[in-house]
Amino acid sequence: GENVEQHPSTLSVQEGDSAVIKCTYSDSASNYFPWYKQELGKRPQLIIDIRSNVGEKKDQRIAVTLNKTAKHFSLHITETQPEDSAVYFCAASMRNAGKSTFGDGTTLTVKP
Amino acid sequence: DTAVSQTPKYLVTQMGNDKSIKCEQNLGHDTMYWYKQDSKKFLKIMFSYNNKELIINETVPNRFSPKSPDKAHLNLHINSLELGDSAVYFCASSQQGGAAEAFFGQGTRLTVV
């Protein structure tokens, strides 16, 4: 089955700096790669996603890149703000797989 | 008009008891899930249902029994609760059998004492 590895497990940055979280996946058939943000005590919520026919996607301060050959994808957050502090999960799935396989999460702390 | 709602939000119970968690989605999605989030924050799939049919059971103990009476509901019943069952349980739903955004419920924090 699919296996998703996520690094780092914790990340601390100064406000205004950039943060990068990386994930690798094992199943070359996976074609959908979402990123979820989970604030303390809340539910995970999608912040950005990318499909395998695209190499990069941006949404304001957030971007995701995908390298299908190497089977890895990354989340980039620029100009970080304290409210970006949360746990971030990457995931990988394919149509009709019946699930997304999640990475173990990255706890991002943005220091004011 | 909550998209995915699950109840209760908190559940404190003694070892050996049986409890249920209910989940409903009003998004018209065809796939529903139960995820378990442990104290280390890992999100692990437990069950996945597509149009009321069980399609994934990730080696979850038999004490856990999901039930989907219709496409919009997926309940979780747990028998003979153990201390190790303490966790946050999230219900979620999505389209396209998983290859689309998953919408999560608010979570149920289960504490077994």
Image (spheres, rainbow, N blue to C red):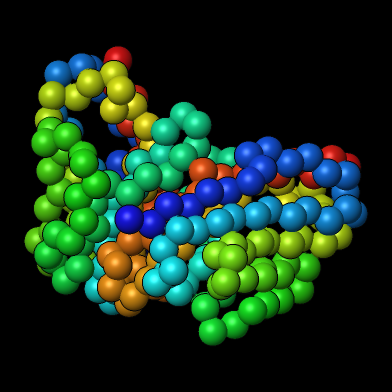
Q: In this view, does B112 lie to the left or right of A2?
A: left
**Residue visible at 63% across and 39% down?**
A9
Q: Is residue B59 above or below residue A34?
A: above
Q: Where is residue B61 in the image (x, y as percent from the top left)?
A: 17, 34
Which residue appears at 50% of the width and 31% of the height? Answer: B40
x then y, percent, for residue A101: 41, 55
Query: Which quadrant holds residue B63?
Result: top left
**Is residue B94 something one can see in this rendering?**
no
Identify the residue at image location x=90%, y=54%: A16
Residue at image location 88% in from the left, 49% down from the top: A15
What is the residue that sits farthest to the bottom in this orientation? Answer: A53
Does A111 sit above or below residue A29?
A: above
Residue A28 spot, x, y in % from top left: 44, 69
Q: Is residue B107 above or below residue B51?
A: above
Q: Is residue A23 visible?
A: yes
Q: Is residue B53 left or right of residue B109?
A: left
A49 over B108 or under it: above or below = below
- For this rendering, which residue is in front, A100 or A7? A7
Q: In the rendered image, which quarter is residue B52 located in?
A: bottom left
